[in-house]
């Protein structure tokens, strides 16, 4: 059965992508296909959507939800870092827009059964792509205490990373930690104040493990390396991020690419402009409005940044 997704900042995404009839757009994180459906509405009647997702559930879901537009959709069960190869495989020189929605979906939290949520007692998996070998349980039960502390501190910006790592190592000596519920209880016991904090004590630890299991920050950087060569002149990149680490990478990399290409003298195109130039469209991060946050609380931490190849 198909699951649906409320696309975050739908209007802003379409505006910054510059969606137009006949355009070719790539959604590198299909998720619940909400943004993909919106793009297909804008690039009708003859535009093309290229959809990628590392989660097999998302691909199967998109096949159902986008079945009425199947002739204008190409779906790939692959990570968005493969987009440059996918574009070549389709015989395209480039695309007119690339969208990345880096957030975790409601399906992952409530329907995947892979332990993404600290509010559920599920196998401690956290793999977006179940074809990969390493799970969150592997990390929790095998890494040394200092390695766990580094992950919680670096990826989760967790203040109590040392205490949490020690508690985990002590607990696993008795028996392996196998479920999300068990891990959440251990974190709550390790954090001073426990459940009296504004957010759930396990929020940052679960985020950090998910990032580590799926190599999320590394893969984001890998995609950004190839953005100029994937976009047609005038093509646009739009990225929705949901925590400071992702947003910092996007902000710094876009700024660096814009500065680099402004500084470089060549080669030039027919109009005398340096090839591969990116122009940042969002000098300040764009956030959802209060009405959207009220209707969809999961949107509250969204940050949108966009750039254009000129």
Image (spheres, rainbow, N blue to C red):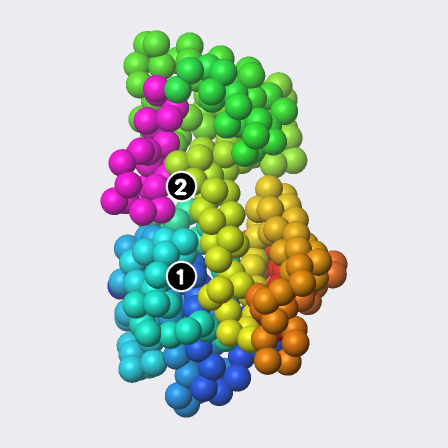
Nearest to the observer: residue 200 or residue 137: 137
**Tag 1's secondary structure?**
helix
Confirm whether the magenta stretch covers residue 139. yes
Observer able to see residue 34? no
**Which stretch did the figure color magenta?**
113-142
In the image: residue 55, left or right of residue 18: left
Q: Which residue is mark 1?
A: 84
Nearest to the observer: residue 32 or residue 283: 283
Q: Position of residue 192 (x, y in %)?
A: 62, 19
**Tag 2's secondary structure?**
helix
Q: Position of residue 91 (x, y in %)?
A: 33, 74
Within-10-Å neighbours for mark 1: few <14, some 14–19, many 20+:
some
Nearest to the observer: residue 279 or residue 178: 279
Of the image marks 1 and 2, the number of the one nearer the N terminus: 1
Would you identify the image quadrant in which residue 80 lies? bottom left
| 227 is higher (above) or lower (below) than 128 | below
Nearest to the observer: residue 19 or residue 33: 19
| 220 is higher (above) or lower (below) than 75 | above
| 286 is higher (above) or lower (below) than 129 | below
Image quarter hosting the N terminus: bottom left
Q: Which residue is mark 2?
A: 214
Residue at 32 percent of width and 56 percent of height: 78
Q: Which mark is residue 220?
A: none
Confirm whether the magenta stretch covers residue 104. no
């Amino acid at each position: 059965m198909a699951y649906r997704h409320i696309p975050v900042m739908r209007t802003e995404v379409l505006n910054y992508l510059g969606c137009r009839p006949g355009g070719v757009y790539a959604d590198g994180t299909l998720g619940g296909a909400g943004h993909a459906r919106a793009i297909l509405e804008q690039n009708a009647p003859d535009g093309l959507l290229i959809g990628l997702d590392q989660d097999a559930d998302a691909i199967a879901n998109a096949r159902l939800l986008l079945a009425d537009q199947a002739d204008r959709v190409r779906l790939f069960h692959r990570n968005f870092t493969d987009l440059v190869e996918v574009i070549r495989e389709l015989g395209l020189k480039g695309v007119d827009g690339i969208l990345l929605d880096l957030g975790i979906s409601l399906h992952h939290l409530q329907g995947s059964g892979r332990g993404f949520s600290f509010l559920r007692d599920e196998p401690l998996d956290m793999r977006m792509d179940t074809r990969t070998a390493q799970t969150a349980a592997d990390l929790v039960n095998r890494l040394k205490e200092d390695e766990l502390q580094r992950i919680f501190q670096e990826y989760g910006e967790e203040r109590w990373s040392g205490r949490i790592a020690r508690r985990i190592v002590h607990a696993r000596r008795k028996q392996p930690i196998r479920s999300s519920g068990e891990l959440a209880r251990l974190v709550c016991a390790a954090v001073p104040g426990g459940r009296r904090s504004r957010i759930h004590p396990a929020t940052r630890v679960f985020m950090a493990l998910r990032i580590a299991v799926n190599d999320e920050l590394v893969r984001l950087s890998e995609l950004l390396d190839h953005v100029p060569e994937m976009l047609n002149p005038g093509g646009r990149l739009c990225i929705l991020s949901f925590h400071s680490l992702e947003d910092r990478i996007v902000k710094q990399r876009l700024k660096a690419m814009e500065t680099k290409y402004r500084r470089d003298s060549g080669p030039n195109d027919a109009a005398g402009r340096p090839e591969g130039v990116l122009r940042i469209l969002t000098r300040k991060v764009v956030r959802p409005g209060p009405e959207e946050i009220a209707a969809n609380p999961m949107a509250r931490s969204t940050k949108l940044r966009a750039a254009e190849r000129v």
